Amino acid sequence: MAQQKVKRLPDADVEAIFGAFAAAEPEPKGELDYVNPFTLLVAVVLSAQATDAGVNKATKLLFQLADTPKKMVALGPAEIEDKIKTIGLFRNKAKNVFALSQQLIERFDSKVPESREALETLPGVGRKTANVVLNIAFKQPTIAVDTHLFRVANRTGLAPGDNPLKVEQGLLKIVPDQYLLHAHHWLILHGRYICKARKPDCWRCIISEWCRFEPKTPAPKGS
């Protein structure tokens, strides 16, 4: 379904939307499994063009064997590849996981850095991945724009933009401070389960009264 071009919502509606999200789910959580900042970083790198459920299935054993950069390097590229072979693009991802583990050891004393600039120097880590890690591991108020969040921001009128960076910057300007830490989780989960790409479930959406998407999807017959 093509994105509709809509005008940005007024501040009062933005406040109402995030107030509704907060009331419904005060502490939203990401769906990737991890045990520390390093395994979170690896999981997010692996999640590109893959489902969280698929990544969790593959990393269950991987993280039992290698939950630190040193253990991951000791495992080696071939063994990493073998453990994640059910994930799309697994060969390239295995190379990146091995290489970023090496760089964490050599450049960051085996610790995941707490800045976007430093994170983006690691193999396989772009702005979205860095923002997820900063938000979840280090409680920084960043917004990671994936396809779900991009769709919701444009459909609703929260932060219309023709690329992820514009949407991210737009949201950072308009999301009230008290909601900023959890904003990207609320929007991603909303896009994943309610505001779906082909046919949004407007009839069970908690923010439909403020959303500018039209026409709203009616409830299925007999529901």
Image: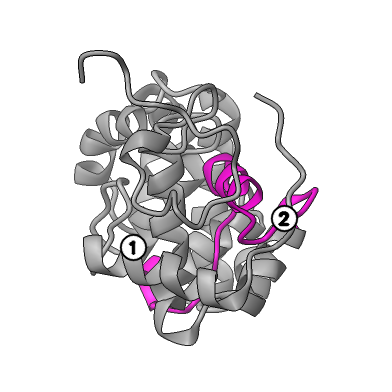
The answer to which of 24 and 68 lies nearer the viewer is 24
The amino acid marked with disc number 1 is: Phe
The answer to which of 60 and 4 lies nearer the viewer is 4
Measuring from the top left, give residue 25's x and y in whole percent.
23, 61
Task: Determine the secondary structure under disc 1.
Answer: helix
For this orientation, the residue located farthest to the top is 221
What residue do we see at 35% from left, 35% from top? 203
Determine which residue is flagged by label 2: 160
Measuring from the top left, give residue 40's x and y in whole percent.
37, 56
The amino acid marked with disc number 2 is: Pro
45 to the left or right of 178: right
Mark 2 Cα-neighbour bin, 10 Å: few <14, some 14–19, many ≥20: many
Q: Quadrant of residue 19?
A: bottom left
What residue do we see at 44% from left, 49% from top? 208
The answer to which of 24 and 217 lies nearer the viewer is 217
User: CA–CA distance between discs 2 and 1?
Assistant: 19 Å
Determine which residue is flagged by label 1: 21
162 to the left or right of 27: right
> Disc 2, disc 1: CB below 8 Å?
no
Task: Determine the secondary structure under disc 2.
Answer: loop
Q: Quadrant of residue 22?
A: bottom left
Q: Which residue range is magenta in the image?
A: 136-165
Display coloring: one colour
212 to the left or right of 29: right
